[in-house]
Image: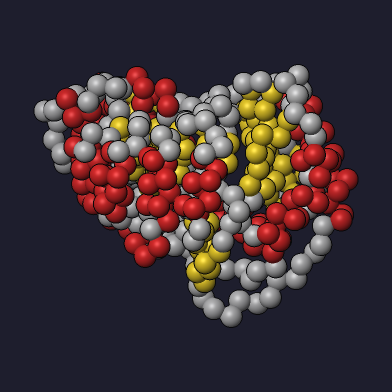
Amino acid sequence: MSQAVDAVVRELLGPLLCAQSSGARWRLLSWDVDQGITLTLSRGERLLFVELSPRDDAGPAFARTRRFNLTARPAFTGGAPLSPEERAVVTQLAQLVAAREGALPVVARPAATRQSLVREIEVDRVLVAEGAGHYYINPYVGCMIGCEFCWAATNADLSRALEGLPELAWGRWVDVKVNAPEVLRRELAAHEPGVVRMSPVVTDPYQPLERKYRVTRGCVRELGDAGFSPAILTREARVLEDAPLLARCPGAAVGLSIPTDDDAVREAFEPAASPIEERLGALRGLAAAGLRTFVIVQPVLPMNPARLVEQIAPYVRAVRIDRMHARARSRHLYERAGRLDAMSDEFAAATEAALRDGFRAKGVAVDELDDLAAALAAGDAAPAARGSTSRDG
């Protein structure tokens, strides 16, 4: 991450960064600037995620300051509301931000001189703690797959704005953390082994640039050598190339995002991502390699839910299902697919219900929480042994 952006965050959150740790009070466990400014607060085993994004009066927010929206949620609780104590903590944080944001520089952004930009950057930290035994890393920031419905685009651009970089469309820029494996090796030596998440929030770990840079592969190798368990989610079938490496990592889990069974729909919504059949092939190969496998059906796109269940169920231990949350701004994608009917709440509810019922009937755990650890543990029988009579589609 940029040293310039780190300096901005240290100015903004100074007292919080310097606060002494105490088990009796909330403390800042970790922070990063890959997806806006993201903070993890902890008190004992309780965790609270807080995100700072650019001020937007139309967007959801717990609180707004002159420059930022603040959103917050308890970690790994399936969307539970904030408790009165948690609300008070986030209110205090918003007051701190409001009091200190005036000292931040307002950096002019030059006009873009290129249509796309890949930057090779060096970072001084990679591993971000999410609680006891849980971490995440982003081998890249930005994503050349560039799904137009991706909610991360605005948040990810916040760091570029704070650094004074030109504004580029989502999918047209990527920062490659070229020294991430080396930095990660040092960090792993100072932490207890646990689960390390790599998922396509502000990046896809196996996006096309991975073919050249192999940053994700280098990080996976370091995780395995140190006894950590990678949990990877991707839209890209090339993850299968690393199946032998992942199989050497204790408890590794690999998931594919498969939001439809219809590749024409995929082409309308995710034109730069791997075709559906390639993702299904990768899923079958990962399961055959003995890896713990899962699928994320999100956003739920136009599909034949029964067919998707048949294609996926024999090869996964768990699934997560969620609807499109950006339907209004994604209307042109539904038009492109010729499926404006699928924008309705009725479509989303009926499709989600059919998927949940179908997967559960096949013995696949349907996870409702923020992470899949419990669901994966519940499905420790070999996935290919269940539903073996199901068709591959």
Q: Is residue 219 left or right of residue 291?
A: right
Horizontal and vertical percent for residue 320?
A: 40, 32
Q: Nearer the viewer, residue 229 or 295?
A: 229
Quadrant location of residue 132? top right
Q: Is residue 393 above or below residue 155?
A: above
Q: Nearer the viewer, residue 61 or 130?
A: 130
Quadrant location of residue 43? top right
Q: Nearer the viewer, residue 342 or 317?
A: 317
Horizontal and vertical percent for residue 382?
A: 22, 25
Quadrant location of residue 321? top left
Measuring 66% from the left and 20% from the top, which residue is drawn there?
Answer: 44
Measuring 16% from the left and 41% from the top, which residue is drawn there?
Answer: 393
Q: Is residue 46 above or below residue 240?
A: above
Q: Is residue 102 above or below residue 246?
A: below
Protein image colouring: secondary structure
Residue 14: in sight, yes or no?
Answer: yes
Measuring 76% from the left and 33% from the top, which residue is drawn there?
Answer: 90
Q: Is residue 95 left or right of residue 169?
A: right
Horizontal and vertical percent for residue 279?
A: 27, 48
Q: How many marks?
A: 0
For the N terminus, give its image quadrant. bottom right
Measuring 67% from the left and 28% from the top, which residue is drawn there?
Answer: 42
Residue at the farthest bottom position = 113
Q: Is residue 15 left or right of residue 33?
A: right
Residue 204: in sight, yes or no?
Answer: no
Q: Is residue 82 left or right of residue 282?
A: right
Horizontal and vertical percent for residue 275?
A: 27, 55
